[in-house]
Image (cartoon, rainbow, N blue to C red):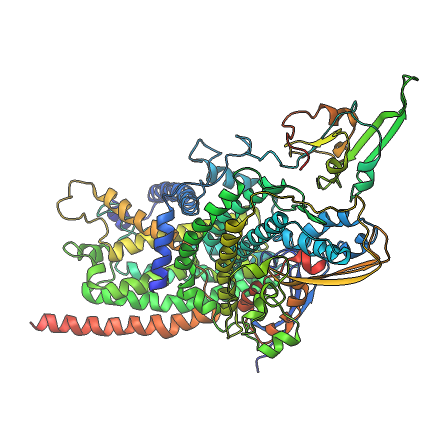
Amino acid sequence: MLGLMKGLGYTMKNLTRKKVTYDYPNKPLPLPDRFRGIQKFYPEKCIVCNQCVNICPTDCIQLTGKKHPDPAKKGKIIDTYDINFEICILCDLCTEVCPTEAIIMTNNFELAEYSRDELFKNLEWLDENDDNIRKENKA
Amino acid sequence: MIRTEEMLLNVGPQHPSTHGVFRLVVKIDGEIIKEATPVIGYLHRGTEKLAEDLQYTQIIPYTDRLDYLAAMTNNYVLCHAVETMMGIEIPERAEYLRVIVMELGRVASHLVWWGTYLLDIGATSPFLYAFREREMIINMLNELSGARLTFNYMRVGGVKWDAPEGWIEKVRDFIPYMREQLKGYHQLVTGNEIFLNRVKGIGAYTKEDAINFSLSGANLRCTGVKWDLRKNEPYSIYDRFDFDVPIRNDGDAWSRYHCRMEEIVESLKILEQAVEQFPQEGPILARVPKIIKAPKGEAFVRIESPRGEIGCYIASDGKKEPYRLKFRRPSFYNLQILPKLLKGENMANLIAILGAIDIVLGEVDG
Amino acid sequence: MIEELLRSSPGLLNFAIFFLLAVLLLFVVLGFVTFGILSERKVMGFMQMRIGPNQVGGRWGLLQTVADVLKLLIKEDTIPKAADRPLYIIAPVIAFAPSFVVLATMPFTDKLQFADIGVGLLYYIAVSGITTVGVVTAGWASNNKYALLGGMRAAAQMISYEIPLVMSVVGIILLTGSLNLNEIVAAQEDIWFIVLQPVAFIVFMIASVAELNRVPFDLPEAESELVAGYHVEYSGFRWAMFMLSEYVYMFAMAALTTILFLGGWHPLPFLGFIPAAVWFALKFSIVIYFLIWIRVTLPRLRADQLMEFGWKVLLPVALANIFVTALLKEIFSLL
């Protein structure tokens, strides 16, 4: 009986303690800067080196490049850049290998959509995803 | 003459207390279990086969998803295996960070076990109390690694991120807080007579059985075998810390409960020392080639995860992908004793026995 | 007034009056169930460091239960193909009807009561036993193994805990010399029976929690073992009937506890200016709070331990209590 009484005492004590729940979604969740959310992509910084495609463990990135329109300049610029968020696991490896920080993480994590097709994000969408950008990108 | 009939009951794969998608086909006579056959594989993703096509760095996020309650230890076992093959010396600061996150993970994992086990037994509140503390750990790890569950934090040769400002102090403050909360846990549950009656003498096995079934972790230590790889085969920097290996002698669910609760205390001890000795300066990543290639050969390493011995075997032919990768997943091995334990038991004990083994289905199915 | 009506010759007017009164009581009880569930969730939430319902009906979630019931009403009514259809349909009714019928004899105050019958206490216990039939029927008719196990557990548990429940109140009956609930309350004018019969009170509380199928005795619907027990196949309004009967029983049992042990509507000394109904509601609420508090804290018993506890502990204690009460009563009457 003593054990039961002690347990009852403990729950009673907790009745008045501070509540620990978050008021999500009314208030945004407090997330640390390093939080890995949906990527933001800078088309102008990309040098089409394909490293992100190679490192991606789930093969969710597809990109194509094209010749630089200014014939005086060498190299390629990005043409299309798609991430399939059906299979992306937000592992951070693409941002880790990117030499120009053209792809970086943001703190946005809300990806719910009504259709699977909408999870296929293209270059424009990833370019516009520019709030809550992570400040610290390289360790 | 009363005729009784045996009944075949499918417990799971959608059952509230199989902790995931685990199915148990039990043959019952009334409420007495005659035979139990576990059916696994509902969560099988073929991690080991997938790894054969992946570079070593790419495998790390996959290990997060094995034992998702203590992903840091899984990260570590893979990195440790590769580092052993390549003979890389890990910087001091990285080693301390690794130990701190692994021990935090151990505390968080045991907290989830404690909460869900009591939820299985029928008490709802402990679950929420345990998650309150776990949330703090998860938040700390989130701040460090950028994810709450699938950390992808360790790299071959060190860790990805350095500790942010004030992080070590947060861990330091957490230790006395957690000790205080543990007192409350014992007050709420440990002395509870109903709980005692539910777990004492339930699912008991002998030392010999435990060894024959290749059990490890708290499932082994509850029978009185003092075996903890952190002590017996110290890896990383565990030989620098002073801690005990809690054991019990009865081999029942009650002993396992005590082993795990005391392991939290021991983990806090390790954390306290690690935070104290944490080096002020230093690199967090050893000098490693950009593309990691393990030399030709093979290696097997094992470490102590919250659930038992997790091992990683790598066979390499010198390429940047492993030729064969195998994880010794402790939950899978620990689960094997279940049919033996369940035979002749009451239906209500099924949950108490299964819960006490502490399985994570992601790990069982690989 | 009701007494006169009961004694007058039957007629349509009588029927209409009783029907209207019953509907009124039903709404009172439904109101209790609505806020009983809400308060249960709120108190549970607060004890578990949560807030509980706070979306529907303002900050306090006042309309949460209403929304839940509405949802249940519009849900699809599923009947398993292999179920025993007539039994499956009638089981919730069998389970619910007695829970409401028992309220007829409850004296909420000295004036507020439906039927003042001589064997009120016995009536309560006898009628409430019928619910078990409904539960077993539901378990059987669902044609589901979990439901069957839950139904069998419910039958075993309710039968074995009904006996200590009855035995524990025999002491009170001995002291009062009556089964009439009004007279039992009247006998507590000076001193409540919780003081005179503490052992009986403890036995009664434990047995009543078991009768209510609440934690720690919620084995028939043990979520972690039997998924949902006897009502695993029920959905929508049929399921709501089972839940409703459970909470109406909670109402009835808390009222009975108040009447038997906490002095019914009698005030504490020097506080007689507070109306009787308020006193009753106050004591009643304390009992309800206690039931919720237990639910938050305790784990569940095991089926076989539950049986052992009922037959080997509670029953002998209740019997001993009867014996001692009888003995003491004789001694005191001799003095």
Q: Position of residue B220 (x, y in %)?
A: 58, 70
Q: Position of residue B234 (x, y in %)?
A: 62, 63
Q: Is residue C88 above or below residue A70?
A: below
Q: Nearer the viewer, residue B239 or C44?
A: B239
| Image quarter (top left, top right, bottom left or bottom right) of the C terminus of chain C | bottom left
Q: Is residue B154 left or right of residue C39?
A: right
Q: Position of residue C39 (x, y in %)?
A: 40, 43
The residue furthest bottom is B1
Task: Report how many numbered discs are placed on residues in the image.
Answer: 0
Q: Nearer the viewer, residue C319 or B225?
A: B225
Q: Position of residue A100 (x, y in %)?
A: 77, 29
Residue at screen point 25% across, 57% down:
C261
The residue furthest front is B281
The answer to whether one can see residue B209 in this image is yes
Residue at screen point 36% across, 63% down:
A3
Quarter of the image where one finds residue C227: bottom right
Quarter of the image where one finds residue B27: bottom right
Residue at screen point 42% across, 47% down:
C44
Q: Nearer the viewer, residue C190 or B64?
A: B64
The residue furthest right is A71
Q: Nearer the viewer, residue C284 or B142?
A: B142
Q: Is residue B2 above or below residue C306?
A: below
The residue furthest left is C335
| Image quarter (top left, top right, bottom left or bottom right) of the N terminus of chain C | top left
Quarter of the image where one finds residue B39: bottom right
